Image: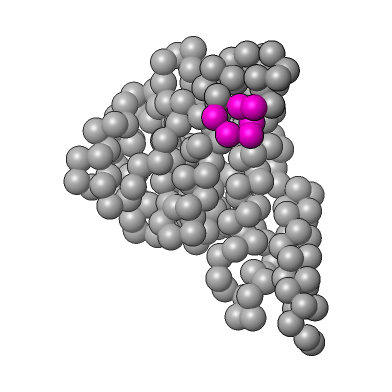
Amino acid sequence: MDRKERLRQIMKEEAETISKAADRIDYDVMSQIMDLFCTVKKKGKKVILAGCGTAGQAAKRIAHTLSVVEVPAFFLSPADSIHGGMGAMQEGDILVLLSKSGNTQEVLNYLPAAGKKGLTVIGVTENEESRLGLAADIVLKIKIDKEPDCWGIVSSASTLASISAFDAIAFAVMEETGYTKEEFYLIHTGGGVGDILRKEL
């Protein structure tokens, strides 16, 4: 297989993975997460996200997207969390923990404090029987057949599937809460999006 064909194959495999995830994912669980996210702002609470490695990058991306649609959210570094960072976690907040295996120790470190402080824990994992899966209040299972790298183990398509699921949740929340372009422009005056909004409003 030549280089261009291999590149095309990888991109198509990633796209197909997300398509398959859309057929497999539990929409009742996604709806349950939506219900929680729709109330975050009016209750004065926040969504806290965490993960390690690639899952951590996905958590950062999801946190930003939620903030964009006025669901207050931020990424809490696993390294900072055990050095006082978990002080940001307060009763009624929502904690979203991403771990493909569900057994990543740095992610599991949040659970004792979250339990004692009264947070709702959402675990995003492929393994419902993992330590995260068993401890979480809500489990969003995202499992794929194979990663598209030559070894089939580098988290990539699975990460995109997680991001896609939370994009769907965020944009559905945006519609359900009646989020307006005027509200969006208040927080997004910069870049090309800000230019578009300026012309439309």
In the drawing, does residue 117 fall left or right of residue 29?
left
In the drawing, does residue 198 fall left or right of residue 80?
right
Displayed quadrant of residue 110: top left
- The one of 3 and 194 positioned closer to us in this rendering: 194
Kindly report the secondary structure that dominates the magenta region of the rendered protein.
Answer: helix
Residue 10 in the magenta stretch? The answer is no
Displayed quadrant of residue 73: top left
Relative height, residue 38 to residue 63 (above, below): above
Image position, residue 75 (x, y; %): 40, 41
In magenta, the rendered stretch is 190-195
Q: Residue at x 63, y 13 (%)?
A: 182
In the drawing, does residue 110 fall left or right of residue 100?
left
Image position, residue 196 (x, y; %): 69, 26
Q: Is residue 36 visible?
A: no
Q: Is residue 53 visible?
A: yes
Residue 192 in the magenta stretch? The answer is yes
Relative height, residue 164 to residue 52 (above, below): above
- The one of 132 and 201 positioned closer to us in this rendering: 201
Image position, residue 130 (x, y; %): 48, 57
Q: Residue at x 54, y 53 (%)?
A: 125
Q: Residue at x 60, y 47 (%)?
A: 163
